[in-house]
Image: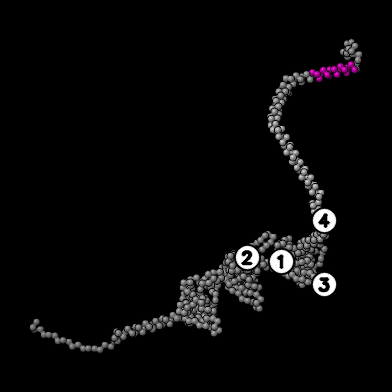
Amino acid sequence: MSGSQPKALSQSTVRKSRRLPVIWAIPLVAVLIGVWLAWDTLSKEGPTIVISFQDAEGLQVGQSQLKYKEIALGTVKSFDFTKDRRGVLVTVATTAQAEQFLTAGTQFWVVKPRLFAGNISGASTLLSGSYIGMLPGDPSAKPERNFVGREDPPVLDSDVPGTTFFLKSDQLGSVNLGSPVFYRGLSVGEVLGWDIGKMAENVTIHAFVRSPYDSYVHDQTRFWNASGLSVKLGGGGVEVQVESLRALLLGGIAFETASNAESSPVSASEHVFPLFASQEAARNASYSRKIPLLAYFSASVRGLAPGSDVVMHGLTVGHVTDVRLAFDVANDTVQAPVHFEVEPERVLGVGHQAFKNTAEGVQMLVSKGMRASLQSGNLLTGEMLISLEVVPDAPNVKVTEEDGSFLIPVTETAGLAGLQASAGELLRNVNAIPFASIGQSVATITKNFSSLSSGPQLQQTLNAVAATMTAAESAIKKLDTEMGPTLKQLPGLATELQSSLKQMDVLMRSVSTGYGDNTQFHRDLDRLMAQLNDAVRSFQALADLLTRHPEALVRGRTDTGGQ
């Protein structure tokens, strides 16, 4: 150990470090996090939009959201008033996801509890509060940042497959926004809205039919107003027709397609159809051929109006189109010209008739006695109709045209005219009865009867009758008193009479037993009567012989040879 030399200590050198201190990393990381948060926040923000509403009911700044398919796409930022101070401007800060939907045509509305189109919507907002709903428009449209909000939610979502058709009508009737569209009793669509035609001449209803039911709509399809309740009083009684309870409350539209038109192409979107007032009117429209006719009536046409039926053999063949009054200069009278149309396609077999034109066909029917008459369609409502009937031995009349219609002769021998004539004749007969003379005679008879009833003769007669009744009552009492003992002996006499009858019955049975048909006495009597009969015949023969031969008493019978 002592011999070992200690090692020399190495000399250390100090070098200066060029790294930053670790403490400087903390603020750097904070800056980076702040930048990232700022970038993340800015990247998620979308454009700010402004929506105008009539009011901001239910909306709150910083709480109410903008939603699409229950996904929040923004928050209400502030409120302001429009320049005319009639509305509210709602500023909404949207998210980046909402930017793709903010194009022209996008619709906004406030979602809150309400009853709309027959459905209760927005019930969930009772707890969560109101929010702004959105229905995106066309994605290819130009971007938009200012919108006009709807007061009611849209009836239909844009992503529901189907087709919209236009229905033209003279009036809207009971059809409402969201009214159902029916096909064979099924709800297959809704009414999206309507437009007023030029100069308010008609209404164009936008009817949406969902897929696949839109494939049943063809160009020959008939639409009609199925709203409310249809009540018809006819010969078969009261007929009530209603499409459904929903149509009764909200109104509705129904359609059908004839079987012969189902093979035709499907109608394109926004095809225009007429909207008929009823199902009957829609079915009548399927008859394309119509013959205009005209008839002049001198009788009252009260109860006859456009739309009244024209019947033949009790079945509808047409309808009245116009009723008015006209002065007949030739006859110096006022008549009622009635224009009506007959649909020959309603009569089977008419197409097989070969006529050169319609005028020839009408002339043929008139020459066979076809006439027009007024008849009562319903006695309760006073409804009138025109009846086309064949009158036997009717004179042939040449058919002429007037105002583009064929003039048909009329008859007043039947129907309402006949009833009116009979009623007039009855009234004339009733008026001919001398009611005044009959009344005077009745008054005289009544006066005489009153004098007689109050005169002394009637009083004497009544006194005599009263005395007679008193005497009769006294006689009956006396008879009852005197006949009492006799009546009391009647039961004993009846008993003795019954005993005598029994003894007589025994005697008759005894006689019958001793001298009846099967007794010995009766048989002996029969033999005795036979012997007496033989003796009588012998005496008769002897008398005849002595009459012819009196000498026989002396000589005896000569036929035997003895004397």
**375 is higher (above) or lower (below) than 41:** above
Look at the image and tell me whether residue 164 can be seen: no
Q: Secondary structure at mark 2?
A: loop
As drawn, is 486 to the left or to the right of 146? Answer: right
Q: Position of residue 347 (x, y in %)?
A: 72, 63
Q: Earlier in the sequence, mark 3 or mark 1?
A: 1
Q: Which residue was labeled with disc 1?
A: 308
Q: Which mark is residue 329?
A: 3
Three-letter amino acid code at the position of disc 3:
Val
Q: Earlier in the sequence, mark 3 or mark 2?
A: 2
Residue farthest to the left? 2
Q: Which residue was labeled with disc 2?
A: 229
Q: Are marks 4 and 2 in contact (CB under 8 Å)?
A: no
Which residue occupies the foreground of this view, 2 or 176?
176
Q: Nearer the viewer, mark 3 or mark 4?
A: 4
Q: Which residues are magenta?
A: 531-547
Q: Give the residue drawn at x 73%, y 35%.
A: 482
Q: Earlier in the sequence, mark 2 or mark 1?
A: 2
Q: Determine crowd level at label 3: few under 14, some 14-19, many 20+ residues with C-alpha closer than 10 A.
A: few
